[in-house]
Every structure is written in C-alpha cells, then in structure tokens.
Image (tube, rainbow, N blue to C red):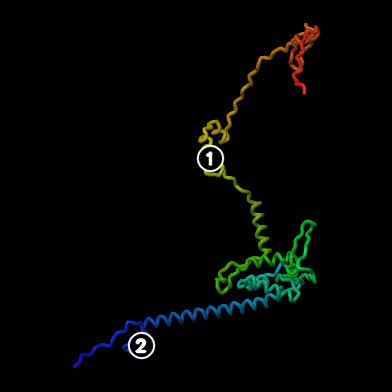
Amino acid sequence: MPSATSPPKSILKSSFNVSNGTPAPLNLSREKRSRQVALHHAHLLQYRKDIEARNLDSTETLLDLPSSSSAFPSEPSNADTHTLKDALRTFQPSDFDALVEERNIDHRCGYMFCPRKNRSQGSCGKYRIVTGRRDIDFKVVNPQELARWCSDECGKMALYLRVQLSGEPAWMREWKDEKPLELYTESEERMARGRRHEQRTPPILATGPGSRDEDMQQRMRDLAIERGDKNNVDRVSGKVTVVVKDNDQQEQRTPVPPNTKNNLGGAIEGYVPTGKHISKRVSGEEEYPEDIIPTI
C-alpha cells in the first residue's frame, strides 16, 4: 500500500497557499500598504482642492475691501485687517498677483485697503521715465506696474504684504502654525517704538573687570611686552610718566666782525678772498692759460 506523501512545495513565491488556496500574509501587507498610499494621495488631492477653493473664496472677499468707501489706506479698520490677514494665509505670490489683476480690471487700486481707482497710463510706450522731486531722481519703469496702484505709497504697502507670502503651496506646509502677516503701517509703528525706547534708555558702557575696554587694554599690554617696548606698558593702561628735561644750552659765541684792514672787502657769501689773484691781475703778472678748446 503506497504511503501518503505531501504535495511538492514550490520554490516560487505564490500569492495563494497551496494547501487551502488562501492569500499569503505577505500579499496581505502589500495590498494594505498600497491601499494606504492610495488613500494618502486621495486625501492630499482633496486637501489641495479645499485650499484652492478657499483661495477662490478669499479672492472674492478681498475684492470687496475696504468695507467703507471713505476708508484711508494707511488706517484700515480692525475688521478689514483681520479679514485680510486670515485670507492671505494660504496665498502664494501668484495668487496675490491674480487678486491685484482682478481689482485692476474693476478699475480699482490693487491695494486691498484703498477705495480709490488705479492710475490710467493710456496708450504709452513699453517703458516710461518717472521723475521724482528733483530732475536727477528718475527711474525707468513699466507702465503696467504703475497702473496697478493709485500711488506709490499704496504700491509700497501692497508689495510689503507680497514679500511675506510663501512660495510653497499651502497644502505642502503647515500654514496654520505660521506667523501672521504684518502690515506696512504696523512695521512702521514697531520701528518707531524701538527708536523711542532706545532714546529713553541710553547705552550703559561697561568699564569694570571683564568689560570690552579692559580686555582691549590687556591685549595692548601683552603686545607691548611682546615687542619689548617696556616703556609703553604703563602708557597703554592710561598712566603716562612725564619727565621734564631742559635742553642743553650751548655756549653762545660772540659774533666776530669782518676784517677791514685790507682793501679786499668782506666775505662774499661766506667766502673770504685771499687777494693773490687780485694782486697779480693789478700788476699784470697773471698768466692766462691757452685756449684748450681745439680748433675745428
């Protein structure tokens, strides 16, 4: 009677068990991991759609700002400020440019807190020269950039908001934990408070041990000792030894008057003539040398 033998075991990895035909545990974990990856990408796509829908709703809300037609751009209301900061949290610079463009289409200033109309440039060239208070203060700009705002001040305040926006999409960063945006007027007030605080509290100069001045003096002493200049060691510390020394008085010589006994006259620029050549020239005995220049 033949003995019962077990079925042969395959050396290949099979997705089913040979004995009962159930899936293997390895395939179970693989399918679960694939399902998790698919769900993660689906949630990410849905989150991205939610952020884009939020940006679209925020753009429509910011188009209606400011809430008052008589509002001043540098003094927005608290409600408008809260609405703007909350709406721009998920914005990118491209979303901000699209918002400014939508406001310009409606012939409004691109700054959200300004109720005035934007500047109309007409049919001008590709570039335009803008002069300042003086004739030498000029710059070449694109007319389309000037048409985005009603004034340079509104453009400055709007661009201050734009540079604070992140270039990374909101669905790829933790935008809820980020620092809130700061208005240009708030930045000016913060800097003014800092300047007033510095004026009220003058700086305290440390002069005790361990201070910067004491360290500098010690370094100068070490440098003087290293150079062998022992006289300057005390001078570095602020102590200077003053030695009063009189100059050596030389004997004052009495000026001697010129000799006037002879008829040769006095000295000529310090030279006293001996009279030899003069006596010979008077008696005619002086011999003149022959001309040494050769005849050409």
Residue 83 is situated, as x and y percent measured from the top left of the image, at: 65, 73
- In the rendered structure, which disc, 2 or 1, sits on the residue that comes first in sequence? 2
| Residue wearing tag 2 | 22
In this view, the residue in front, 35 or 84, is 35
Q: Amino acid at mark 1?
A: Arg
Residue 149 is situated, as x and y percent measured from the top left of the image, at: 74, 69
Residue 186 is situated, as x and y percent measured from the top left of the image, at: 66, 63
Q: Amino acid at mark 2?
A: Thr
Q: Residue furthest bottom?
A: 1
Q: Is residue 198 above or below residue 21?
A: above
Q: CA distance from mark 2 to mark 1?
A: 84 Å
Q: Residues within 10 Å of mark 2 (few under 14, many from 20)?
A: few
Q: Is residue 209 above or below residue 174?
A: above
The circle on residue 219 is 1
Q: Residues within 10 Å of mark 1 (few under 14, many from 20)?
A: few
The circle on residue 154 is none
Numbered disc 1: secondary structure: helix
Residue at screen point 32% across, 84% down: 10
Is residue 107 toward the left or the right of residue 181 in the image? Answer: right
The answer to whether the residue labelled 2 contacts the one labelled 1, judged by CB atoms less than 8 Å apart, is no
Residue 159 is situated, as x and y percent measured from the top left of the image, at: 68, 66
Residue at screen point 62% across, 68% down: 165
Residue at screen point 70% across, 69% down: 76
Query: Hey, which quadrant is residue 104 in on the image?
Result: bottom right
Query: Hey, which quadrant is residue 54 in on the image?
Result: bottom right
